[in-house]
Image (cartoon, helix red, strand yellow):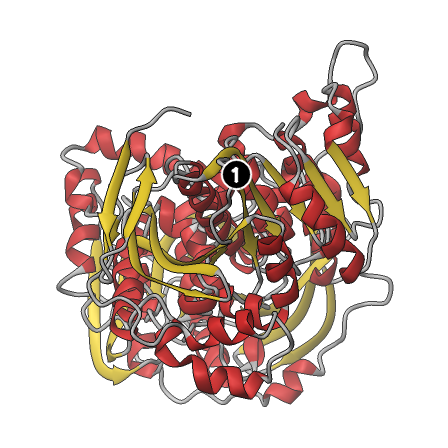
Amino acid sequence: MNSQQNTVRDSGNKTIELRGSRVLREHAFGLRRAWPMICCILLSGIGHCCNSALAAEAGDGADVLRADERDAFFARYFERMTTPRSLFTFADRQSWLRHAQALRQGVLERIGLWPLPERVPLDPRVTGRIERQDVVIERVYYQTLPGIYASGYLYKPRGPSTLALAKPLRRAAVLNPHGHWPEGAADTNVQARCIGLARMGLVAFCPDSTHVMDLPIGLCPIGLMTWNNMRALDFLQSLEDVDPERLGCTGGSGGGQQTLYLAALDSRVKAIVPAVLVSWFRRILFVSEQTHCFCNHAPGIARLTDEPELAGLFAPRPALFICATGDWTRDFPREEFPEIKHIYQLVGGEISCVQFDKPHNYDRDSREQMYAWMNKHLLNARGQEAVREGDIPLESPAALKKLGPMPSGLVGLDGAPGYFRTRHSFNRALPGAAGNPAHNRVPTLRIRRDLLGERGPCVPIDAESRGTSSAAGFRVEKVLIETEPGVRVPVWVLEPGRSTVDRRRPAVVLAHPEGKRALLENRGALVRRLLDAGAVVVAPDMRLRGELRRRWDWNCVIWARPENGMAAHDLAATAAHFRSRTGIDPDRVRVVGLGETAAMALFAAALNDRVAGVAVEHGGPLFAETRGPQAPAGILRHGDLPEFAALIAPRPMWINGEGGRFRFTEQCYARFHSPGTFRRSDLDQAEFEKELIVWATGGRR
């Protein structure tokens, strides 16, 4: 590889030679403490140093970043990922309507509902009933997916409306999804508004919420709840005493979130009242490790849109937004609301906002505002909208819950992941036709980048040396590598002593699940043996590991930047940087994933074809064996690790401890006429490390 050569000097007046990328900028303060932890390990022959002694000696001297730099990084990255996009950029009605059509499909894709599931017969079952003087309450189960049932409470007026409104031939109905109230759908707060609506002469239905998820197949709580709510509208429209054209929806907090998604995606909702919910996503996310309930984190939704834009999809249907000064909606009237109002001014329709000087709630004052809105827009009571709730006798939550368990033989929402996996999982079968290589079936580059949240190539932007030292004949250096704008990855570089033979060395990028410090503390013998074999050892702290450790798993989900994807990007860019470093053979820069870093290492090689080879110590777990945020959302619709690993062919790959999981990858290598570069094994740690030395430092390809 041809590139210009540059030299810079460190604080000890030593010359560091580099090739390619940009000039490596040397930090002024150097290494006054000479990295006590690294020196301790190296001088001891990488013996097992006491963990407490290592921790005591390491201090800040072994870190590449200062504490204030780490804090600033997280603050800047958070700002970059959560900066709102203004709706004032839409200048006319047609531009918004064109955007809205594409946005609805994009939202359905993000929450796992594209294409929409099959609308099977509702098969409603009533398992219990409470008959009061003014309201009848029923426990209802209805089929939401094939063989899978959702549940809820139906409130129907009994007799004429207490407000003496003219009774329509068929009643309007309001869906009431609930939030995180202590007793769920049976909570007295939820009961109050449902009974209040029924006393007005409307039918009210409150479906039970769910937090079932299976992110690898694209199933998230808000996606499943949105589908259940669509099916709940089907149920209301199926009732003989409900007017199918007069449907509303309201909910507070998490119920407001369900209202937001349902009304944005289903035009059957004609009157909309989300309470104490709508805001920029950034108001419910945190720079720290604090987090709201994971049901708020629809996969990748913040990359696609924001809550005010979702609310803009309501237009021109009438919408009332209720907010409070004591929660994240305190600034809604002066910041988010004008944006939504702008869309209504383009499209038409009535929109309003009311704020109470109260904490987070959906109390009587808020409910009475909602009653008036439904009275005006569903009952056409213009000029007499105001409604007073009055005293509402409530049932105990226990009494509602006794109305009936799920009928025998029915399957609840816990069965939803099985349905989604059966319907949406990729087909691993190899094509049998001659001349149609299996490699063509693996995920495309666009799908791969979309799943991992990639926006650009995995190449380093810049690098900065922060000092060098030496111990036991080895050279150690601290480096910051900018892997994407504003992201600087801390790296330790360990190099053998200079060889008397003029040749370029192999480099091994070692990924450890806990970062570079844990690598040297726990796998020091492997590091020493690689150095003794003449390899340069590169130990990075990928994002959310080591010095950059932070538990941001649900932030990563909503941003469409999965942890595995960010780590893979950092590994790939780090490997690319060392291809251009003087003294390193660019054709022998390989990535090795230790512990449970198989996905990071394999994705790194799949993202950048300049990674010469990849080895992983444990070939699992596969994404099919998980349910949570560890997997890129929806990845199983396109493939699993063996499919993505096949993209690396024909470069060398070694999968250890895989238990037969990667036979598909092996077959793809064979079809690609490169079977000799692929290896599967089930070695223990000692044997793996022994053979890794040969694999990582072998001859040129």
Left or right: where 289 falls relative to 397: left
Q: Where is mark 1, residue-wise?
A: 501
Image position of 467 with respect to 144: above or below: below
Give the residue type that dot 1 points to.
Answer: Val
* Quarter containing the C terminus: top right
**538 sits to left or right of 668:** left
Residue 211 sits above or below residue 340 on the image: below
Say which of 498 and 673 sits in front: 498
* Residue at (56% x, 56% y) in the render: 511
Of the 4 image quadrants, the one containing the N terminus is top left
In the structure shown, which secondary structural element does the residue marked by tag 1 occupy?
Answer: loop
Percent x, y for residue 553? 49, 63
Image coordinates for residue 184, horizontal then vertical, percent: 56, 77
Examine the rendering and report whether any part of residue 529 can be seen.
Answer: yes
Quick one: which residue is furthest to the right in this view?
409
Residue 61 lies, with reference to residue 170, above or below; the image says below
Residue 123 in sight? no
The structure residue drawn at horizontal position 61% and vertical position 55%, both measured from the top left corner, is 532
Please tell me which residue lies in front, 209 or 470: 470
Residue at 42% of width from left, 72% of height from top? 291
Residue 602: x and y in percent read 61, 43
The structure residue drawn at horizontal position 30% and vertical position 55%, both measured from the top left corner, is: 465
Give residue 109's position: percent from left, percent from top.
50, 41
How many other residues sit within 10 Å of disc 1, few (<14), some (14-19) or many (≥20)? few
